[in-house]
């Protein structure tokens, strides 16, 4: 099977005006492992060295690193390095997927493990409200009896065309209703918005955080640190499984998306969440490098 | 003596209906006491509750508008026949086991969900379902070491569960206080009715907590984690901490290092093994749950995950408080325990099911509709807007049938007799499979005819519950539980507590100074021909920044004293607390008539003198005392310097202020004995500033401060302590070597005006205060990055 090898460096740097006295961090920076994605190597390096560091798997199966620091510091640097191969997803013929109306009821009534797991993603979550506003936006794509994949592809395309990518328009705290009204935002907003649309129609959708390999314009060299962490969504299709969808780029993630974690919304998968005491005026800088390697023999991994 | 005959056993004045037999001893006793005596006993109870500061905090629209409402107790207990209690007990013990099993299942394999005994939305859409708690190891699978149930008795005598309290059940402390008080007020009734004793409750609680400890080398440290004085049950938190001999901690007093929880004390970090938490699930750890919580401890869940600390109750145990579960308990009981549910819950329909939704919609006028998830919030009825919301998200609602409450004899607050509807909370403790029901309860009189589930506020009239003891030999007399030395753990002083002691000292001293100045002003205003002096005094107060007439300032200070004292009340003696607790009542209305106001100020000054007397004579010289004394000395020095300054700064008529100045400093007699002359400024100042044997002088305060500085704990910050000591020693050296002389324009030191020296002292004192704050009190508030 064809596969793409990536080397990823993700650096998170916090700087503070006054010393941080204690700092507790949860990091979801380990790429997920499944049939499509193999994580060959992964390290997290933290400076200054944490007093305690441990790893556990969270509710959604994401690997979480906990680190606490008790010595005063004015700079905290978290560097995550990963080596990952990604294979393309199985894409069913969209016309052969089940009618969208049947999906929600199936997830509620069916007691198989996948269906029950999907039921988790049917409801409003802390950062994704549901309501008629989102359902109304989605309805033109969801005509009666339309196969779910077809409808979701259509919705993805509409969001891509209707919404403007604008990093100045929103913050982490911008309510989703505002995103709907202004139709501007970043990948996180579009992902939350599409999830809200799907859940408002009773469909299971989850939030995926990860990386996207960016390709520089022809003739330009790729800039170091120019990549960013990315977010997209995944929708559950009975009998097939979860199908990823990237509303920011209007495509089905394939061999250039690397998955870190999934959950109900950004709150469940935030790459670095920290609680500090002390440390005024924090500034944050993040640099991500996703480098595609063309090693011979990768195809047979 | 007149013995009322009572063949039918009616309770005179309460009800014409005959009472059942278990009431007989109590009724005989109350009848025997007669109405006059009862009124006086009830007054005694009220006074005792107020003086002991038994209160629950009722929050206002703004944090500072909250008030502490004195606990209301109707001394007449509810008597429950042993047979009725036994039936209840069977049902409650089963329910405790059931809920513990359910919590273990929901946080583990989730068979209840997979096998369809619970619908998926009930868990997945439930905001109380904390996913981070999933698969976290809970010692012995005991999610519910403590469990409380709200019960209602319907008019046909059947009992119904209104609500399960599974995360931090409050009320046990109030139940024990009620029992203690009723025993004191109605000793003869207790003798006659012989209710089962509650003396075993606290030892049982302590043992249960000790057993949770992950520490294997014995001597585990237990703390009570409280949300703080603004919580309605804060009184109970201090009560439990005191009775269990453990430290009362707020979130900021605890810290996680190396996946262990520690208590921050003045002597450094102390490891904590068990936390009796009175903070709700979602507020316990801002790192894992709500990031906006200031009540929790970041990293707490990680310490639980590592198995280094145990929480009672386990994190996540609030999930089954959701009213929606009530509808599923009968089926779950058969599934998990293979038994029929013995004690019914208030009839509940979860609207997430199609059939149940139809049922509820067809009876919207009759049924109460409320949140499926949360006990808080109100229930509603009727169609229209409610039906719209119900249809938009049916799984978020339950419909409930109200329980019509049965009535019991009660004394109204005015002493009249009535029959009132009631409900009660009972308490269980156990290891997850074996539970014990404490043989008592907390009855509340809601003033309503019927109830559904709810988060019942503590601020309602309450009653004790008596279950007559079946064993005739069993002693019914309350025993004094002797806390043996071996069960005592060293009581650590969290740095926040040191902070509060420091400010308690400062505010008490500031209040005294303020009261003395006002008293002086008021006194001179009553003197004939005192007008010029009064003008001078007013000008002096103005220079000191004291506002007149001063009612607001006095009340404000008393409020601050109360807050600081409240935060450390688990460390104050009962007498000390009673004294401080009396202050707010004193200041409730400050009379405008000068003589009455004078009287009040005299009382205030005496109260504060009593407080400092207790501080000197009754308080162990621990760190608490140390910071209280340092606060007092610092404040007295600062006030004295400000007073002297404003007297010497007076442009004219300075001599009119000499006597008031000595009076404010309580040094008139000392002066007269020493000098036998008219007051000369330089003599008066010498006495107030530099006489080491005058306990009101600056020199005396600085000497005391120097002694205290030598006792400051050094573990937390060696450099800080050295700086503090150095500052105080330098100040002392200056004070002890200063020589005051009379210059042309007033007193001088080394040829320079006194003013400069005074400013120097004030500056140095301020520096000491800053250093103290930096070294001991700096609490940084954690926040999400």
Image (spheres, coloured by chain):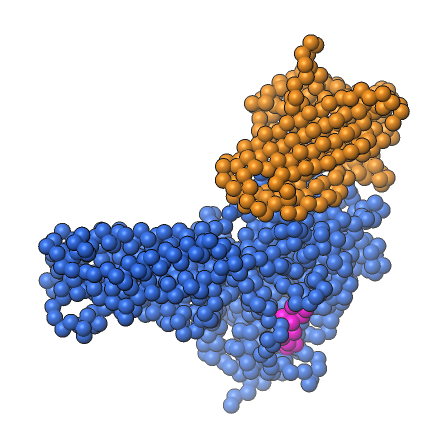
Chain colours: A orange, B blue
**To which quarter of the image does residue B488 belong?**
bottom right
Residue at the location (14% across, 66% down)? B679
Left or right of residue B107: residue B516: left
Q: Nearer the viewer, residue B760 or B679?
A: B760
Q: Residue B565: percent from the left, percent from the top?
A: 44, 62
Q: In the image, is residue B204 part of the stretch drawn in magenta? A: yes
Q: In the image, is residue A80 part of the stretch drawn in magenta? A: no
Query: Seen from this angle, which residue lies furthest bottom?
Result: B1
Residue at the location (66% across, 21% down)? A224
In the rendered image of this protein, does residue B25 appear above or below residue A284?
below
Q: Which residues are magenta?
A: B195-207
Q: Residue B271: percent from the left, percent from the top?
A: 62, 59
Q: Nearer the viewer, residue B236 or B392?
A: B236
In the rendered image of this protein, does residue B327 appear above or below residue B390?
below
Left or right of residue B18: residue B45: left
Q: Residue A64: percent from the left, percent from the top?
A: 72, 40
Q: Residue B276: percent from the left, percent from the top?
A: 63, 60
Residue at the location (13% across, 64% down)? B680
Specify whether residue A145 is in view. no
Residue at the location (74% across, 64% down)? B431
In the rendered image of this protein, does residue B333 appear above or below residue B391?
below
Query: Seen from this angle, which residue lies furthest top?
Result: A219
Q: Quadrant of the C terminus of chain B?
A: top right
Specify whether residue B279 is in view. yes
Left or right of residue B262: residue B134: right
């Amino acid at each position: 099977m064809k596969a793409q090898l990536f080397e990823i460096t993700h650096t998170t740097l916090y700087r503070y005006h006054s010393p941080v006295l204690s700092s507790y961090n949860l990091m979801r920076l380990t790429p997920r492992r499944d049939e499509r994605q193999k994580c060959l190597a992964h390290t997290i390096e933290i400076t200054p060295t944490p007093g305690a560091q441990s790893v556990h798997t969270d509710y959604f199966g994401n690997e979480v690193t906990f680190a606490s620091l008790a010595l005063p510091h004015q700079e905290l640097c978290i560097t995550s390095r990963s080596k990952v191969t990604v294979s393309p997803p199985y894409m069913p013929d969209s016309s052969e997927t089940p009618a969208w109306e049947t999906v929600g009821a199936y997830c509620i009534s069916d007691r198989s493990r996948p269906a029950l797991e999907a039921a988790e993603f049917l409801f409003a979550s802390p950062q994704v409200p549901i309501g008629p506003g989102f359902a109304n936006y989605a309805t033109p794509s969801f005509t009666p009896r339309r196969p779910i994949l077809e409808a979701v592809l259509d919705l993805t395309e509409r969001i891509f065309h209707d919404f403007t990518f604008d990093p100045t328009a929103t913050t982490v705290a911008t309510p989703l209703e505002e995103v709907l009204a202004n139709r501007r935002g970043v990948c996180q907003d579009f992902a939350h918005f599409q999830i809200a649309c799907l859940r408002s129609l009773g469909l299971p959708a989850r939030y995926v955080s990860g990386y996207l390999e960016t390709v520089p314009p022809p003739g330009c060299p790729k800039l170091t640190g120019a990549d960013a962490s990315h977010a997209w969504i995944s929708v559950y299709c009975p009998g097939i499984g979860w199908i990823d969808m990237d509303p920011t780029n209007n495509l089905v993630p394939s061999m250039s998306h690397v998955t870190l974690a999934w959950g109900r919304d950004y709150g469940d998968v935030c790459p670095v969440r920290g609680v500090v005491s002390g440390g005024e005026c924090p500034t944050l800088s993040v640099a991500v490098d996703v480098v595609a390697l063309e090693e011979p023999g990768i195809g047979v991994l | 003596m007149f013995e009322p005959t009572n063949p039918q056993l009616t309770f005179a004045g309460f009800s014409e209906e005959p009472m059942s037999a278990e009431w007989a001893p109590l009724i005989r006793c109350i009848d025997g006491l007669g109405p006059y005596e009862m009124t006086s006993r009830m007054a005694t109870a009220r006074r005792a509750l107020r003086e002991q500061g038994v209160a629950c905090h009722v929050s206002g629209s703004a944090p500072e508008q909250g008030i502490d409402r004195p606990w209301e107790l109707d001394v007449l207990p509810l008597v429950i026949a042993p047979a009725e209690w036994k039936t209840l007990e069977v049902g409650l013990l089963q329910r405790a086991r059931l809920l513990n099993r359910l919590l273990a299942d929901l946080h583990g394999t989730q068979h209840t969900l997979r096998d369809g005994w619970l619908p998926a939305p009930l868990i997945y859409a439930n905001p109380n379902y904390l996913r981070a708690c999933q698969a976290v190891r809970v010692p012995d699978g005991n999610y519910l070491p403590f469990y409380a149930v709200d019960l209602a008795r319907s008019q046909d005598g059947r009992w119904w569960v209104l609500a399960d309290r599974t995360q931090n059940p409050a009320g046990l402390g109030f139940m024990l206080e009620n029992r203690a008080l009723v025993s004191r007020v109605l000793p003869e009734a207790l003798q006659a009715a012989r209710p089962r004793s509650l003396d075993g409750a606290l030892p049982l609680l302590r043992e249960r907590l000790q057993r949770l400890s992950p520490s294997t080398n014995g001597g585990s440290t237990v703390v009570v984690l409280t949300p703080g004085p603004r919580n309605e049950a804060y009184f109970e938190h201090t009560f439990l901490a005191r009775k269990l001999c453990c430290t009362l901690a707020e979130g900021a007093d605890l810290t996680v290092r190396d996946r262990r929880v520690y208590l921050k004390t003045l002597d450094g970090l102390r490891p904590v093994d068990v936390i009796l938490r009175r903070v709700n699930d979602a507020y316990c750890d801002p790192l894992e749950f709500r990031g906006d919580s200031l009540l929790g401890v970041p990293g707490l869940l990680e310490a639980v995950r590592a198995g280094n600390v145990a929480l009672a109750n386990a994190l996540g145990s609030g999930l089954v408080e959701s009213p929606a579960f009530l509808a599923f308990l009968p089926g779950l009981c058969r599934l998990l325990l293979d038994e029929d549910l013995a004690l019914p819950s208030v009839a509940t329909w979860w609207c997430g099911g199609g059939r149940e939704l139809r049922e509820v919609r067809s009876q919207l006028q009759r049924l109460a509709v409320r949140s499926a998830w949360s006990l808080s919030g109100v229930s509603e009825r009727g169609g229209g807007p409610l039906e719209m919301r119900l249809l938009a998200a049916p799984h978020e609602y339950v419909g409930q049938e109200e329980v019509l409450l049965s009535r019991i004899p009660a004394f109204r607050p005015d002493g009249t007799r009535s029959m009132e509807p009631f409900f009660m909370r009972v308490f269980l403790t156990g290891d997850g499979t074996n539970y014990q029901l404490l043989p008592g309860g907390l009855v509340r009189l809601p003033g309503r005819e019927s109830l559904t589930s709810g988060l019942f506020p503590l601020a309602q009239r309450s009653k004790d519950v008596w279950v007559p003891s079946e064993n005739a030999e069993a002693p019914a007399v309350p025993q004094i539980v002797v806390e043996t030395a071996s069960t005592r753990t060293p009581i650590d002083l969290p740095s926040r507590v040191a902070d509060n002691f420091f400010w308690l000292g400062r505010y008490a001293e500031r209040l005294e100074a303020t009261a003395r100045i006002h008293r002086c002003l008021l006194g001179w205003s009553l003197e004939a021909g005192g007008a010029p002096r009064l003008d001078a005094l007013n000008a002096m107060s103005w220079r000191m920044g004291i506002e007149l007439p001063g009612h607001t300032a006095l009340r404000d200070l008393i409020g601050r004293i109360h807050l600081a004292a409240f935060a450390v009340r688990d460390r104050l003696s009962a007498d000390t607390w009673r004294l401080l607790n009396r202050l707010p009542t004193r200041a409730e209305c400050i009379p405008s008539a000068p003589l009455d106001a004078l009287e009040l100020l005299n009382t205030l000054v005496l109260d504060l003198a009593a407080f400092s007397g207790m501080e000197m004579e009754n308080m162990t010289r621990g760190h608490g005392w140390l910071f209280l004394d340092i606060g007092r000395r610092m404040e007295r020095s600062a006030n004295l310097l400000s007073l002297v300054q404003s007297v010497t700064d007076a442009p004219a008529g300075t001599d009119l202020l000499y006597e008031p100045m000595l009076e404010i400093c309580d040094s008139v007699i000392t002066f007269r004995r020493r000098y036998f002359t008219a007051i000369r400024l330089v003599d008066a100042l010498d006495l107030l500033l530099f006489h080491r044997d005058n306990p009101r002088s600056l020199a005396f305060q600085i000497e005391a401060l120097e002694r205290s500085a030598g006792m400051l704990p050094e573990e937390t910050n060696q450099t800080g302590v050295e700086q503090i000591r150095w500052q105080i020693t330098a100040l002392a050296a200056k004070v002890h070597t200063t020589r005051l002389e009379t210059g042309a324009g007033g007193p001088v030191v080394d040829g320079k005006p006194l003013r400069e020296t005074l400013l120097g002292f004030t500056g140095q004192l301020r520096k000491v205060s800053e250093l103290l704050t930096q070294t001991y009190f700096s609490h940084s508030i954690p926040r999400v990055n």
